[in-house]
Amino acid sequence: MRGKPQPEPLLTERRATPAAPPFRAGSFVLITLNSPREKFWGAVLEITPAGLSVRGVDLNSFEDFARQLRAGDPVAPAAVFFPMHRVERMELDLRSGDIPSLGERFESKTGRAATGVFESGSGIQPEISVGCTLAQAQRRLIRATFEAVSEDVARAAELLDLSEDELRSWLAR
């Protein structure tokens, strides 16, 4: 004898926890830009409707940057902002089968973890000998920054939070 059909138990709604966004701060990405066409690799600092802030290197400079870093030269990745109208494509830097990611290539060429070099707090790593004065350390930092941006006074002044005249004064010392 069959009884009355019983209703199926209601499924309780599961609260889906949102997955972390793939393009969050610290994610390594390859960015394709237009006008002019460029490719840039690095770690996302921030994404806003206005644009994309990244700490990284132009893909054309990747090999030179890795070589300089391995040699111990005082180099640092650039912190740059790209207006959104220039961003054509952005993809996560991930391994594809046997093809290593750019981050893995970087680590094998430099012997250093990309995350340590490109983290937002990292900066220019000038050689500062033990026992130097604060003024000597400041001069070395300013000189290294100036050289790292290909002697672009405006850019170096901006990175160091100095006026261009203050920067020139430090460089003259």
Image (cartoon, helix red, strand yellow):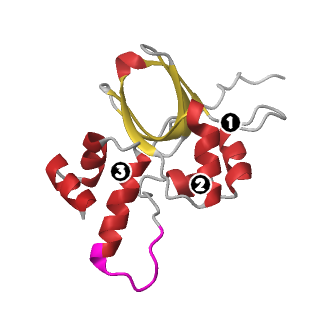
Sequence order check: which comes first, mark 1 or mark 3? 1
Of the two numbered discs 1 and 3 in the rendering, the one whose residue sits closer to the viewer: 3
Which residue carries the number 1 mark?
94
Taking the image as drawn, is residue 54 in sight?
yes
- Badge 2 marks a residue whose secondary structure is helix
Magenta-colored span: 127-135
Q: Is residue 59 above or below residue 88?
A: below
Q: Main secondary structure of the magenta part?
A: loop
| Residue at (35, 50) in percent of width and height | 146
**Kind of residue indicated by mark 2:** Leu
Q: Dot 2, how many residues are within 10 Å of its Cα: few (below 14), some (14-19), or many (20+)? A: some
Position in image of residue 61 (x %, y %): 57, 36
Quarter of the image with the N terminus in it: top right
State left or right for residue 138 relative to residue 40: left
Q: How many marks?
A: 3
Q: Dot 3, how many residues are within 10 Å of its Cα: few (below 14), some (14-19), or many (20+)? A: many
Position in image of residue 65 (x %, y %): 58, 45
| Residue at (80, 33) in percent of width and height | 99
Which residue carries the number 2 mark?
69
Quarter where residue 30 is shown:
top right
Q: In the rendered structure, does residue 130 fall within the stretch colored magenta?
A: yes
Sequence order check: which comes first, mark 3 or mark 2? 2
Closer to the camera in the image, 141 or 18: 141
Closer to the camera in the image, 125 or 113: 125
Closer to the camera in the image, 50 or 62: 62
Q: Is residue 80 above or below residue 143?
A: above
**Kind of residue indicated by mark 3:** Phe
**Kind of residue indicated by mark 1:** Leu
| Residue at (51, 22) in percent of width and height | 38
Which residue carries the number 3 mark?
146
Mark 2 in CB contact with mark 1 (< 8 angstroms): no
